[in-house]
Image: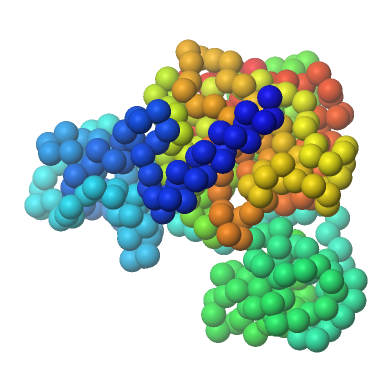
């Protein structure tokens, strides 16, 4: 039931707030990251490879696609018990095994269907309906523009500049919203169609896959895709897990309370649960993290998972607590409405296939 889900989420959030996001997982399990005592660096072509070790034992192997210092530091911060890092001697062979790809942060936004138009330049002290649209969109994308009141105040100005700095560079962050900034706000990337799978005519389902990109907070950008009669129809971008816990696992190797993304496998989609009435996105909320509506999920196969309290909800408190504790977090209300429309178009659609490319996800 929802109260159980909410209570579990409160426990997990309290745990990770108390420990700065690096707490001991629920059920007293030790995560692989917590076992790591030192890190070893290698070069593999134009990429950096980080081998996380406990003594001589290899715990995890990461491929870092970025050469930025901040991305390297972000990797180090995931291993709170690692006491040192050094580069492997020239000629030392990189240990074999599966690698976790650590990507750079995302610099593109999924296109919105029928975005609003802009007929003037928006600047500080501008007022109007288009300013409301700007404020709502900035808030949806995780830039705190404050109250959606149609007044381009200092908070909106700061949010615009932060957005421009992230996507165009600090030098271009002037706070003025013209056609270039407006177009970027409403997206420049089409939904990604997943690699071909076994044809499934007559099958209606959702599929979740991982991209190689990260959002501005450090969560991998995921593709949630809608298939009708076996054909791809629509898709939105979502996230899952805490930014510093972006490790993707199969069901039987998942860790309870780890705040990592939900494990690979087949999931059952339950009915929508509204906090304050059907289609009310602006009324009461379940919790600050869940927002006004949620869709509980149950793991079906293969094997079992120790993860619980997994849902699909809006990443409601994204500006202050980005990511989720393992649920699927939808970035915007507009995208969640698209998801709701998919489910209402085919009420009997109950299958979600989470495919991280680990080889255990069943086929539709």
Which is more toward the observer, 148 or 198? 148
Q: From where the camera sits, is residue 93 visible?
A: yes
For the point 72% across and 70% down, the residue is 146
Q: Residue at x 19, y 44 (%)?
A: 37
Which residue shows up at 56% across the image and 41% down it? 10
Give the quadrant of the N terminus.
top right
Q: Which of 215 and 66 is in front in this view?
A: 215
Q: Which residue is outermost to the top?
A: 303
Residue 48, percent from left and from top? 29, 53
Residue 192, given in percent of the width and then of the height, sits at 65, 43
Q: Is residue 360 above or below residue 116?
A: above
Task: State left or right for residue 94 relative to residue 74.
Answer: left
Q: Nearer the viewer, residue 4 or 203?
A: 4
Classify 162 as above or below 48: below
Query: Residue at position x 61%, y 60% from top?
Result: 319
In this picture the colour scheme is rainbow
Q: Which image quarter: residue 24?
A: top left
Residue 144 x %, y %:
66, 67
How many labels, in total? 0
Residue closer to the observer: 15 or 224? 15
Q: Is residue 188 left or right of residue 44?
A: right
Image spot of residue 29 (x, y percent): 34, 30
Q: Is residue 238 visible?
A: no
């Amino acid at each position: 039931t929802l109260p159980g889900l909410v209570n579990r989420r409160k426990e997990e959030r309290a745990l990770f707030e108390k420990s700065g996001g690096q707490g001991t997982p629920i059920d007293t399990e030790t995560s692989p990251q917590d076992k790591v005592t030192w890190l070893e660096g290698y070069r593999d072509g134009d990429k950096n490879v980080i081998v996380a070790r406990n003594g001589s034992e290899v715990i995890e192997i990461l491929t870092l696609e970025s050469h930025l210092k901040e991305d390297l530091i972000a990797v180090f911060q995931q291993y709170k018990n690692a006491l040192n890092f050094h580069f492997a001697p020239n000629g030392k062979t990189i240990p074999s095994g599966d690698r976790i790809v650590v990507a750079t942060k995302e610099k593109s936004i999924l296109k919105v269907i029928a975005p609003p138009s802009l007929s003037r330049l928006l600047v500080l002290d501008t007022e109007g309906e288009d300013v409301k649209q700007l404020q709502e969109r900035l808030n949806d994308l995780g830039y705190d523009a404050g109250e959606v009141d149609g007044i381009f105040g200092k908070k909106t100005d700061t949010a615009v500049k932060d957005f421009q700095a992230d996507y165009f560079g600090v030098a271009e962050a002037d706070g003025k919203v013209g056609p270039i900034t407006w177009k970027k706000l409403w997206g420049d990337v089409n939904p990604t169609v997943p690699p071909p799978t076994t044809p499934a005519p007559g099958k209606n389902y959702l599929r979740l896959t991982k991209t190689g990109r990260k959002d501005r907070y450090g969560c991998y950008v995921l593709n949630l895709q809608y298939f009708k009669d076996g054909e791809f129809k629509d898709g939105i971008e979502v996230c899952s897990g805490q930014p510093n816990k972006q490790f993707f696992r199969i069901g039987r190797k998942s860790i309870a309370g780890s705040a990592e993304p939900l494990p690979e496998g087949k999931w059952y989609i339950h009915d929508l649960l509204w906090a304050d009435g059907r289609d009310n996105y602006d009324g009461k909320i379940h919790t600050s993290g869940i927002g006004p509506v949620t869709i509980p999920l149950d793991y079906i196969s293969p094997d079992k998972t120790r993860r619980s309290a997994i849902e699909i909800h809006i990443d409601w408190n994204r500006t202050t607590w980005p990511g989720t504790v393992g649920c699927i977090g939808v970035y915007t209300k507009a995208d969640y409405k698209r998801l709701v429309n998919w489910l209402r178009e085919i009420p009997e659609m109950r299958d979600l296939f989470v495919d991280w490319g680990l080889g255990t996800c069943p086929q539709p």
